Image: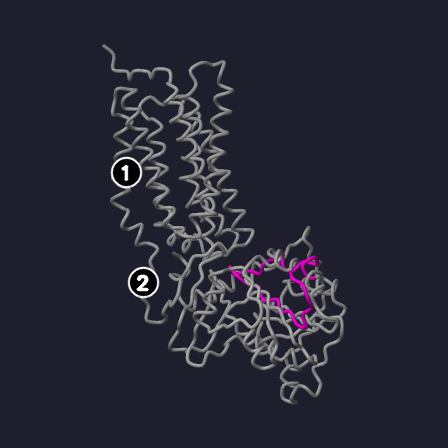
Amino acid sequence: MTNEIAQPAPISPFGRLGLLMTVLISGASVMVIELLGTRLIAPFYGTSLYVWSSLISVTMVALTLGYFIGGRWSDSAKRTGLSFIIALAAFLTLMIPWLTRPVLLATDSLGLRGGAFVSALILFLPSLMMLGMVSPFAIKLSTSQINNIGNTSGTIYAVSTLGSVIGTLILGLFLFPLVGSREILIATGLLLFALALVIGWIERKQLQSTATLIPSVLLVVIGLALLPNVVKAGQIRPNEKFNVRFEQESLYGWVRVIDVAARDLRLLTSDGSAIGASSIKRGESQLSYQDIVGLIPALRPQMTKALIVGLGAGHMAKVLNERYGIIVDTLEIDPAVAQAAVDYFDFKPTGKAIVGDARYEIRHLTGQYDLIIHDCFTGGSEPAHLLTVETLQQLRGLLSEQGILAVNFVAFSEGKNSALNTVSKTLAQVFPQQTTFISEPNKDFNDFIFLASAQPVDIHNERLKIEQQAWLQNRLFPIDNQNGVILTDNFNPLEHLQIAKAEKYRHFLIDMFGEELFVR
């Protein structure tokens, strides 16, 4: 009598179909975890190329390890089956929302690049690696003869890739616009648990043993026991210092409206960026750079039409219309931001209110604008592709002969950072005239307002009061752009130049509200 586990019989057509469905689901789960990873990290580290690079790199490393370890494990496994691999992947996926906050806080000291990468490594590599092991196990179970191993492995990897495609489409087109990222991750973990139990039951019948089912059931029990803690982990606890009036996870970031009653301040934030601020009682803008932008129409006679790219809370559109009678078209990529501006900041469109991607919508705009305000900022960084020569040329094509392009840009005024010089030099490639203002003189970290046009801008004219002229004169900021680079669609190092700024901005809001609001 032998104690060895009986070897499974050649797999049946029904069993092969079940394996292919298992591989399909695991492939879909890989893409769900990878894509949702950016949404978990973005509120703390932003949505820059560094975050995406970290997630993609970690995914590739995890799959590499999974394929390698899974291949060796499947050859030597006697009592450990595919069900345990999937159950472990499910458990590790379910733990991601629970671990996000402590991991992000622990990696904060590593900076933007190091913190984003190490966070992704700790949070997502374990579950993705286990999912990567599914395909080698499936190939082992499906292969009964050595001469069909090529066809078997090719089919398995093709189905896994198809699953990734399906997972991406379902997530992006259906799930993500309707359900939060944490809820989707939890649902993915529970789906994988259910799959593990089904596979475990089948393995039990084939191997005539419960050795592969018991570990899977144990992981399911532990995971379900921890589920209430996982669900609670992402909840924001009540805070006496501020009140979150509105919160929505959009396709582009966590959008919030936050009231700080003690400071009479209402903020509109997207991830770790403040994109609007007003007085709660009076409704007036509290962003000082907008005071400069509000005087621009006085520099040119007879402005009648304007375009704002990056709506924010909508204050600039209101000022331009009420103070100068200008009809303002607005362009905002995030529907949640556009809705928050209407519901919480009393924004009322006077022209076209467009919700869509700036590069695409700009190409389809017609007519001439006397003023275009370029004020795009989210996730701790500017969308770099909106500050290239190609974009600026498109915007100039929408300007009237006397029109002005106003670009709001957050940066450091001193030090070796050449981001200011780079933006200035890029603007100079498209516009012959350029004037720059600093929002708050004598401060290193600041908003800078570039006015670019075909004609010179004169702040000393009769349409401005003497005190307004002096106020603007005090904010003139000379820039020597000789050491800047020209930003193009082909070469755009702006995110690299703005690393220090992104970290500074992130900690500005964290210091104000505490890390809990931006680490979920």
Q: Nearer the viewer, residue 456 or 68?
A: 456
Please state the extent of the stretch shown in magenta in the rendering. Answer: 365-392
Q: Is residue 340 left or right of residue 474?
A: left
Is 390 within the magenta?
A: yes
Is 226 within the magenta?
A: no
User: Could you tell me the amino acid type at mark 2?
Assistant: Arg
Q: Which residue is mark 2?
A: 237
Q: CA distance from mark 2 to mark 1?
A: 29 Å
Q: Name the outermost residue toward the top.
A: 1
Q: Position of residue 125 (x, y in %)?
A: 44, 41
Rendering quarter of residue 459: bottom right
User: Could you tell me the amino acid type at mark 1?
Assistant: Val
- Tell me the residue at 56%/78% (across/down): 319
Q: Crowding at label 1, few (<14), some or many (≥20) Cα neighbours within 10 Å? A: many
Q: Earlier in the sequence, mark 2 or mark 1?
A: 1
Asked whether the viewer can see residue 109, the reply is: no
Q: Crowding at label 2, few (<14), some or many (≥20) Cα neighbours within 10 Å? A: few
Q: Which residue is mark 1?
A: 220
Asked whether the viewer can see residue 443, the reply is: yes
